Structure formats: C-alpha cells, structure tokens
C-alpha cells in the first residue's frame, strides 16, 4: 500500500532526530557566528541564529526550497492536466519531506485538502461582523485566530500528549488550516469588494484552481494562483512573518495562533505591502506619461530624474540577493506569455530593461535587479484583482504553507522556547569602550 504524506514525513523525522541530538550533545559549544553592536541595534540583520531545512536564500541563486532552485521546483513538481504551474499541494509535500512527489502522492494531498476545506459557520459570522471599511489583513488574521477552537494540538496537549507526538497533532492542525485558507480569503474578498453571494468551493479542484474558482476569475488565473502561492511560501526563517510564526509557535501556541501572528507581521508596510506600493508607483508613472508607452530614452531620463530627486525605484534591490530575483523572472515569463500587451506590464518591462544599468552607474544600490514585488501586483491587476489591500492576503496564503511546514518540523525536532538575551545601552557603551572614555573625560 502506498505511504501517505504523514507516514513518509514520520520516517523522515525519525531519520533526522539523531542529527539534531548529536549536534546538541557533541558540538553544542561550537561557535557559528559573531555578533556586532550594529547587528544588535540593527534588528539582528544577517546574524546566524535560526535553523530551518525548509528553505535557504542563496545570494546568487535566490530562494531554494529543500535545496532546489525555484526553476527546479516548478519543473519537478507534478502539474494539473492543462496547467503550466504545479500543484500547490505538491510544494507542501516537498517542503515537508524534501522529496518531489509523484502524481499519485500529490493527489493524496489534494484529496486531504479537499476533505478538510469546510469552514465552520462561526468563522463566516466573525468575518461578517467586521465593518465594511476594515482592512482585509485584519479580518484574515482574526478569522484564522478564531479557528483556534478547532485545534487538535490543544485538545491532545491538555489530555497529556507525549512530546515526541507534538508534530503529529500539529500536522493535523496545519492541513486543516491550509485547506481552509482559500475559502476564507475569497469570502473576505467578496465581503469587502463585491457585496454579492459567495462562490461555493469545488471539492474536485486543487488548491490553486479552487481559489481561482471562488474568486470568480477564469483561466489562467488558476495558474496565477498556483505560481503566487508557491513563490511566496517561504523565504528562510529570519524575515518578520516567518520569524514571528516560529517565535509564537516556540511557546507551544497552536498553528492557528502562530499563523495569525505571522499574518500580523506580514501586514506591516516594511514587509508584505511592497507589491502594492510598486503597482501604485507604476500607475503614477503612467499618469505622468499620459498613459502612452514611452521610448527607452524617455524612461531612462525619468528614472534618472527620480533618483536625482532623492527617491528610489520601487521593486528593485534586495537585502540578500545579488542577482535578479528568480521569483520575478518566473512571473515575467508568465506575463510575456499571457499578457504581453498589458499596458502596465509594458511599463514594468521597460523598467526591467533600463533600471539595472542605471542603478549600477548610480552606484548606491548593492543589488540593481528587480525583486518579486516588481511584477506580482501587475499580474493581479491584469486579471481583475485590482484592490491593493488584498494583495497581502494573497501573500499570506502562500506564506502560511512555509510557516506550517516549519512549525511541524520544529515540533518534530523538539526545538525549545525561543528566548534571546537583551542588554542595555549602558552595557553596549561599556563593551564599545565609550563609557570608560566618558568617565575618564569627566
């Protein structure tokens, strides 16, 4: 009989546990990194202090899922019949196990998600209780939080769950949550922007196709959804959303509490809002140019004028990457195939052609290449999802996949409560030698 995803995952967990145990017991005193004052004050940027095998951000290759580049992931995962993009459920299998699933294994997960997709009535009532002007991320976070009462982990923990079984109950919660997110998100979209009857989910469709169906957007929006959820699913553990999910889960909060907290971190303007800011800026550029497609020379002059005025070009640059973001390139390739004549895409394409060389000459950008946000909002707008505030909800659906995979493995390996030590400014001044100098001068 073919193994289920949970059985395959448990085999991987048993194989991995001795590695973590040995590192702790035999090599626990080995120094991994050094911390500087600028890292302490500057948000711990670049400080190696977290562990995840789910993804790694390679400065030259972009995000790797279980060691595989995005191009390898898109190529290696099974795809629905007639679809260009893989099953999202297949990505979840890969993130959990490190293995590419075959068609049969993917369909097992698709079936599991379908069986768990029904959202309790009280969640709809909570969503309906929000005033019409509420931000969709606030509603999304609250709806997820409300599902806390469904937690398998909570029930079993209070009944006396063995630590080695924490991952099992968390796995059940994770699948229950992920299966419901498309329904919750599409219902929020309908409530805020359509004021009409919601479109019922279709149990015969995979996650991406069912979301497109409930959004009421025709093909190839099913592939748009699959691509969007896959490329946004994980990005190491140090970014705000991923770290928040890990941090809250480390206290043994259930997956609903942890994911809701992750969504709150993602909602901040320094994290998940970048794609809508890029799109807004692009549309402002179009207005300034009277909505006509500029020549390369005109766009070049506009970019220089923007930089010389002290402004930045949104959607370009990245804190870690030193090449074009592969997530951007996948979306660009999709756009060249499906929306090459879209006016906004033409502007984005023109910027891609001129901005990197200008930023190199300008000399202030460490990475002059476009990132994922330079393209994602353009595609959503083309297919009629024109409400900026909802874009971060789409991001949140994808990021939840990575969060759930990470938390399951955190529980499987028995990772402890996260508890770094803080120090005072006075202590830092003494470490830096400032305090002694000041006292001497006095």
Image (cartoon, helix red, strand yellow):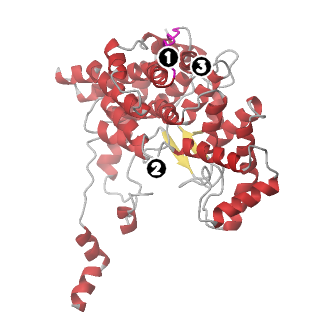
> Circle 2 — which element?
loop
Pick the quarter of the image with the C terminus. Answer: bottom left
Instruction: Label the magenta part by its dominant secondary structure.
Output: loop
Separation of residues labelled 3 and 2 (CA atoms): 38 Å
Residue 54 drawn at (x, y percent): 47, 37
Separation of residues labelled 3 and 1 (CA atoms): 11 Å
Q: Residue at x 38, y 57 (%)?
A: 43
Residue 67 against residue 3 in the figure, above or below = below
What is the number of callouts on the image? Answer: 3
Q: Residue at x 82, y 51 (%)?
A: 295
Per the rendering, the mark at residue 102 is 3
Q: Nearer the viewer, residue 234 or 264?
A: 264
Residue 156 drawn at (x, y percent): 23, 20
Image side of residue 181 versus residue 306, left or right: left
Q: Residue at x 28, y 71 (%)?
A: 428
Q: Nearer the viewer, residue 132 or 89?
A: 132
Residue 441 drawn at (x, y percent): 25, 91
Bounds of the magenta span? Answer: 194-203
Per the rendering, the mark at residue 109 is 1
176 drawn magenta: no
Residue 373 appears in the figure? no
How would you rate the neighbour count of disc 3 (Cα within 10 Å): few for under 14, some for 14-19, many for 20 or more?
Answer: few
Image side of residue 241 versus residue 359, left or right: left
Badge 2 vs badge 1, beta-carbon distance below 8 Å: no
């Amino acid at each position: 009989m073919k193994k289920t995803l949970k059985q395959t995952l448990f085999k991987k967990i048993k194989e991995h546990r001795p590695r973590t145990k040995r590192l702790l017991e035999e090599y626990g005193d080995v120094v991994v990194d050094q911390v500087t004052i600028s890292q302490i004050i500057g948000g711990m940027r670049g400080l190696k202090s977290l562990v995840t095998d789910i993804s790694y951000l390679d400065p030259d290759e972009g995000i790797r899922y279980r060691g595989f580049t995005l191009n390898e992931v898109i190529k290696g995962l099974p795809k629905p019949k007639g679809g260009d993009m893989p099953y999202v459920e297949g990505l979840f299998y890969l993130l959990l196990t490190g293995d590419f699933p075959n068609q049969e294994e993917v369909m097992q997960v698709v079936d599991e998600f379908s069986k768990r997709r029904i959202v309790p009535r009280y969640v709809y009532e909570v969503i309906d209780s929000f005033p019409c002007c509420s931000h969709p991320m606030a509603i999304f976070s609250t709806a997820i939080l409300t599902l806390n009462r469904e937690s398998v982990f909570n029930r079993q923990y209070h009944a006396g769950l063995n630590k080695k079984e924490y991952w099992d109950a968390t796995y059940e919660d994770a699948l229950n949550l992920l299966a419901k997110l498309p329904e919750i998100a599409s219902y929020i979209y309908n409530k805020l922007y359509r004021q009409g009857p919601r479109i019922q989910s279709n149990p015969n469709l995979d996650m991406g196709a069912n979301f497109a169906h409930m959004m009421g957007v025709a093909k190839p929006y099913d592939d748009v959804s699959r691509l969007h959820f896959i490329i946004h699913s994980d990005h190491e553990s140090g970014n705000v959303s991923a770290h928040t999910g890990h941090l809250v889960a480390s206290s043994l909060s259930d997956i609903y509490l942890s994911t809701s907290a992750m969504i709150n971190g993602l909602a901040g303007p320094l994290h998940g809002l970048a794609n809508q800011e890029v799109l807004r800026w692009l549309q402002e550029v179009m207005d300034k140019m009277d909505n006509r497609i500029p020549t390369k020379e005109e766009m070049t002059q506009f970019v220089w004028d923007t930089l010389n005025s002290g402004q930045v070009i949104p959607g370009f640059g990245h804190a870690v990457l030193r090449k074009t973001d592969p997530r951007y390139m996948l979306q660009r390739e999709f756009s060249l195939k499906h929306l090459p004549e879209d006016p906004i895409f033409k502007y984005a394409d023109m910027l891609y052609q001129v901005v990197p060389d200008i930023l190199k000459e300008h000399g202030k950008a460490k990475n002059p290449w476009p990132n994922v946000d330079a393209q994602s909002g353009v595609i959503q707008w083309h297919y009629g999802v024109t409400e900026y505030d909802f874009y971060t909800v789409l991001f949140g659906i994808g990021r939840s996949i990575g969060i759930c995979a990470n938390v399951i493995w955190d529980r499987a390996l028995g990772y402890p409560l996260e508890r770094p030590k803080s120090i005072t400014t006075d202590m830092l001044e003494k470490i830096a030698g400032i305090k002694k100098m000041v006292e001497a001068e006095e």
